[in-house]
Image (tube, rainbow, N blue to C red):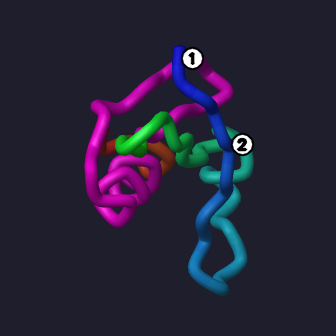
Amino acid sequence: MGTFVVVAHYEGLAPTLEARRHGATTVEQGRFCLARCTCGWRGPARRARSLARTDAEGHARGTH
């Protein structure tokens, strides 16, 4: 089993209320990064952190 590292990425901006309510973060697992949420939602594993962040932001906005 891989090592999990939880890192919240907001790129210097304050997180939106929706992002705080959902707790959308990215998690690194080996060579992959994926979005996870405190509500139980999980995005697909991505090699690009930016895509995982986009998944997390989209979920927080309700588009994923």
- Kindly report which numbered mark, 1 or 2, lies closer to the viewer in this rendering: 1
Describe residue 4's horizontal placement relative to residue 1 as left or right: right
Label 1 or label 2, whichever comes before in sequence order: 2
Q: Which of the image's four quarters has the C terminus? A: top left
State the residue position of label 1.
Answer: 40
Nearest the eye: 36 or 30: 30
Residue 4 is a magenta residue? no
* Residue 14 sits in quarter: bottom right
* Residue 48, percent from left and from top: 29, 59
Q: Residue at x 36, y 32 (%)?
A: 43
Residue 35 is a magenta residue? yes
Q: Are marks 1 and 2 in contact (CB under 8 Å)?
A: no
* Residue 31, percent from left and from top: 37, 44
State the residue position of label 2.
Answer: 21
Is 57 placed above or below 39 here?
below
* Residue 63, percent from left and from top: 30, 44
Q: Which mark is residue 55?
A: none
Query: SS class of the residue under badge 1?
Result: loop
Please count the marks in the image.
2
Q: Amino acid at mark 2?
A: Arg
